[in-house]
Amino acid sequence: MKEASSKSPGRPRSAKAHQAMLRATLELLGEMGYGAMSIEAIAARAGVGKTTIYRRYSRKEELVADAIESIREEVLLPDAGSLWADLDAVIENAAQISLTPIGRQAVAMIISSAASNPGFAQIYWDKYLEPRRTAFARVIDRAKVRGEVDQALDPGLVFDTLSGIMLYALIFPPVGQSWQDYVRGALGLIFKASDECP
Amino acid sequence: MKEASSKSPGRPRSAKAHQAMLRATLELLGEMGYGAMSIEAIAARAGVGKTTIYRRYSRKEELVADAIESIREEVLLPDAGSLWADLDAVIENAAQISLTPIGRQAVAMIISSAASNPGFAQIYWDKYLEPRRTAFARVIDRAKVRGEVDQALDPGLVFDTLSGIMLYALIFPPVGQSWQDYVRGALGLIFKASDECP
DNA sequence: TTATTACGATACGGTGCGGTATCGTAATCT
DNA sequence: AGATTACGATACCGCACCGTATCGTAATAA
């Protein structure tokens, strides 16, 4: 009734239970962080038995990696008409995701376990950063066509710098200014340069 | 023989034991991260009794906060003659600290617990970032005197952006390029702008 | 000296979690 | 139908840790 695959006999694995445990994993990750998270707590939150989790994952890292990987999203950055209108869309998109508890804890986990478990950083890169980096390159391309920025500007480097300042502002929230405005100001530092400096 | 204070009678608290537990805390923080660190392990590593720790700190966060706070360092940025020579000194200084296991875990801890325990971020700001931010402002001032950058350039904003890209490069190490060179390239993005755009 | 406090070491009960096993039930294949 | 596999629930053992208490010893003040 759920998964009409074929192969083996017996009751098939419940997609519902699987989704519930991934969801609970993300919730708890956001609430308490990777280290403090227990399989028992995840099972309880998801309303599934521990067995059902252990049947799928043998280690916590596998579960968490899969949970993060399950976050699929579209990165849509339609042409807003001008460089800054496009940039505002980029900032807003990032704000709605990175300012989330899950986003915070995911980043913290990546940094903390970068040495012992580089897989987390890879997943985060593949699933989150890389698509945005590609989309951002298109924004810069459009700006180049419009003559708004230097033709030689490296989109990847700009994206990394932008990501950096966003991350920084996430940890040390600006005072007397919105997160978005602050990021916009830092971005101005870069694009004042590549305007047109003949 | 250790702390010749006055007041109360009885054996005074051992400065040696105190220092040993702070040191062990930093070591273990770098090795396994905040969450996985136990008081028992700290006591064992420091060669002190658990009692001796509990007599001073009632919670792990207090101990860790104090340990991080105990890292005192001078931030010396002597005039190296040119803007880029000064900047190289800044980058090198940051590299030697942030690329350390302790530095990594400290940052991870701050991000992870930023919501539940803003004290960590505050300590990091006061003890690490703020002194560097001030020192960096002097670097920019010198560059302004030399006419190397725009007079209106905001030193704080530049510093934040620089810190951001450093943090980003810490999480996602550049490939085929040293950390320092990568940061230098990103910095070029900013200072190409404020060179002299007449 | 005596009183007082800290020390390292060890032991203790309590708790939470890991990971496995078991149970009765539910879903699916042949 | 019967075989097979997954399910949620629960119990279980073992372990690591927490936080406190206790012990004999060391260091200091009066």
Image (cartoon, coloured by chain):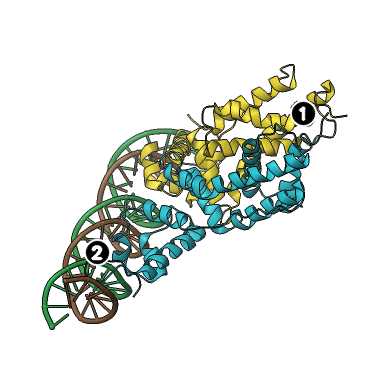
Chain colours: A yellow, B cyan, C green, D brown
The amino acid type found where label 1 is placed reads Ile
Q: Do the residues labelled 1 and 2 touch (CB within 8 Å)?
A: no
Q: Position of residue C8 (x, y in %)?
A: 32, 74
On screen, B68 above or below B196? below
- Between A190 and B33, which is closer to the camera in this rendering? A190
Return the residue at label 2: B7
Q: Position of residue A89 (x, y in %)?
A: 65, 23
Tell which residue pokes out farthest to the top in this image.
A81
Dot 1 falls on a residue whose secondary structure is helix
On screen, A28 above or below B28? above
- Horizontally, residue A67 falls left or right of residue A37, namely right
Q: In which quarter of the image is the C terminus of chain A?
A: top right
Residues packed near mark 1 inside 10 Å, few (<14), some (14 to 19) or many (20 plus)? many
Label 1 chain ID:
A
Q: Where is residue A40 in the image (x, y as percent from the top left)?
A: 37, 46
On screen, B151 above or below D18? above
Q: Position of residue B81 (x, y in %)?
A: 76, 51
Return the residue at label 1: A140
- Horizontally, residue B178 falls left or right of residue B18, namely right
Residue B95 visible (yes or no):
yes
Label 2 chain ID:
B
The amino acid type found where label 2 is placed reads Lys
Residues packed near mark 2 inside 10 Å, few (<14), some (14 to 19) or many (20 plus)? few
Q: Which mark is residue B162?
A: none
- Between B157 and D6, which is closer to the camera in this rendering? B157
